[in-house]
Image: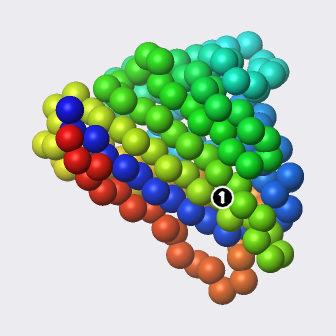
């Protein structure tokens, strides 16, 4: 199975507790998801996020309905958490979120290890492009919500092969 790694990072001029608190509210995921995905959370809210919690979603990708269930497998406020796909479109999806205090704000980073049906061809033709767009949208929304780091206009989203 071919595995890829997505890395995204953004500096936000807000305290780590505030930024982590936003991510700790599962309802905010909808705000960070591009409208073209028609994303909605199916699990009744509010959702008390902690290790072991499962969350069900529905979205549409290129018109196709997709069900997705993720589980919070690591919960270490206010430093990090990990969600893993239990059911959904990926063969593997492990998404680590980290939050580091930096002078005057927070460095928020995403690290995703993923694999897709169809392997390298599907990733090259569809998946990598869609993921870059989703994470760039997410970064743009985070800047709208928390402000722009002085002099930082860059969207840092990279995808690379993690090997077999």
Name the quarter where the N terminus is drawn: top left
Q: In which quarter of the image is residue 72?
A: top right
**Residue 90 against residue 112 in the figure, above or below:** above
Q: Which residue corresponds to the image point at 66% horizontal and 58% vertical from the top-left? A: 108
Most foreground residue, 81 or 14: 81
Residue 138 rendering spot, x and y as whole percentages: 58, 53
Mark 1: few, some, or many residues within 10 Å (few <14, many ≥20)? Answer: many
Q: Is residue 29 left or right of residue 67?
A: right
Q: Judge whether 16 appears above or below 81 on screen.
A: below
Q: Which residue is drawn at 36% across and 38% down?
A: 114
25 to the left or right of 135: right
Left or right side of 60 for 25: right
Q: Quadrant of the C terminus?
A: top left
Which residue has dot 1 on it?
108
In the rendered image, residue 13, in percent from the top left (x then y), is placed at 79, 70
What x and y, as percent, mark residue 19?
79, 53
Label 1 element class: strand
Q: Residue at x 60, y 36 (%)?
A: 82
State the image coordinates of residue 30 (x, y, percent, origin top left): 64, 36
């Amino acid at each position: 199975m071919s595995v890829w790694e997505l890395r995204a990072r953004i500096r936000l001029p807000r305290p780590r507790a505030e930024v982590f608190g936003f991510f700790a509210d599962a309802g905010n995921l909808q705000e960070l998801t591009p409208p073209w995905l028609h994303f909605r959370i199916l699990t009744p809210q509010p959702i008390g996020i902690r290790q072991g919690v499962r969350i069900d979603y529905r979205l549409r990708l290129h018109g196709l309905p997709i069900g997705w269930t993720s589980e919070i497998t690591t919960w270490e406020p206010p430093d990090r958490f990990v969600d893993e796909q239990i059911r959904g479109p990926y063969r593997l999806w492990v998404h680590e979120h980290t939050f580091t205090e930096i002078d005057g704000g927070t460095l928020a980073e995403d690290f995703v290890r993923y694999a897709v049906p169809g392997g390298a061809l599907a990733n090259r033709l569809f998946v990598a492009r869609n993921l870059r767009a989703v994470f760039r949208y997410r970064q743009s929304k985070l800047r709208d919500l928390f402000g722009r780091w002085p002099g930082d206009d860059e969207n840092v989203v990279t995808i690379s092969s993690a090997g077999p």
